[in-house]
Image: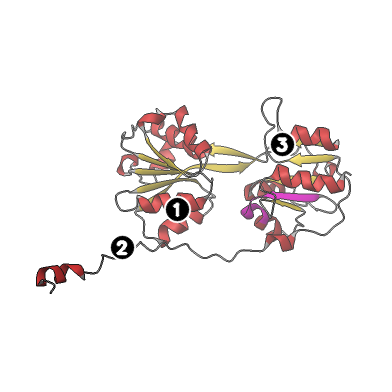
Amino acid sequence: MISPEKSATSFLAKPVVVKPQIIIPHRPEKNFAEFISKDNKTKLKNILVAQPQPEGPKSPYYDLAAKYRVKFTFQPFITVEGVPGKDFRKQRIVLNDFSGIIFTSRNSIDHFFRICDELRVKMSQETKFFCTSEAIALYLQKYTQYRKRKVFFGDMNNNKELRMLLIKHKEATRFLYICAETKKDEIPAFLEANSFNYMEGIMFRTVPNNLKAIRPSDYEMIIFFSPTGINSLFHNFPKFKQEKIRVAAYGKTTADSIINKGLKLHLMAPLNHTPTIVVALDHYLKESNK
């Protein structure tokens, strides 16, 4: 016969561990593959890249130039400007009130530490830094002793991993998201939907470059990397007509902006089996310049 004491403990249910529900704001997303133009892929000779010229002699763009006999012209369409410390003060943010800082770009790191210098703020050694990739995390070494800091980043360079890291530290952390005036709202929307204790710190802005030295019609393709680059094109050339110019986009928000401007989209990355703009361009040039 089973003793009452043994009986009572033998049939106790195991405690159920309830994982916190993570809310990811649903945003209708285009099937961008459907927006890729079916125009014939005619030969490309001159391609305008809306970025600074790569440093050093090695770049995948140079490999494509030699492989397909195409010329690349590099011209940044935007400039990043820092928000002055006196203007940042108007946001009424006390930096040392935050125990977790979120970085999504090198620009955000540069301007965070610039603001710290301007305001003469020294962040606690206990401050946690959350980054979207290892490359961004390693960039922190420019400003602080990396091994003495609490630095967190994902291995896959995407916001999904960043979201999981943020959830893990949610309860004991007050977050500051470092961003530009015109920001991608995916991370703030996630923080808001999951009731994080956070604020947005606007520390830099993007402004159009003067592009009067170039003529868009001189190029068979223009490659964009941000919606602000597209805005810069129309800022400099209000009467711009696409006509036969092919347009390429890196990123969903960039592609979305191109479509919303009524332009044809000819190439995009990441999409299907083309994770980078260089891979996508290689596939395109195999057909256009064969």
Q: Is residue 251 shown left or right of residue 39?
A: left
Q: CA distance from mark 2 to mark 1?
A: 21 Å
Residue at point 66%, 51% (across, down):
270
Q: Is residue 259 shown left or right of residue 107?
A: right
Residue at point 53%, 46% (across, down):
156
- Region of the chain picked out in magenta, as a range: 246-255
Local secondary structure at mark 1: helix
The one of 231 and 39 positioned closer to us in this rendering: 39
**Crowdedness near tag 3: few (<14), some (14–19) or many (≥20) residues, C-alpha within 10 Å:** some
Q: Are marks 3 and 2 in contact (CB under 8 Å)?
A: no
Find disc 1 in the rendering and name its residue: 163
Q: Which mark is residue 75?
A: 3
Q: Is residue 73 shown left or right of residue 190?
A: right
Q: Which mark is residue 83?
A: none
Label count reads 3
The type of residue carrying mark 2 is: Val
Q: CA distance from mark 1 to mark 3?
A: 34 Å
The one of 47 and 87 positioned closer to us in this rendering: 47
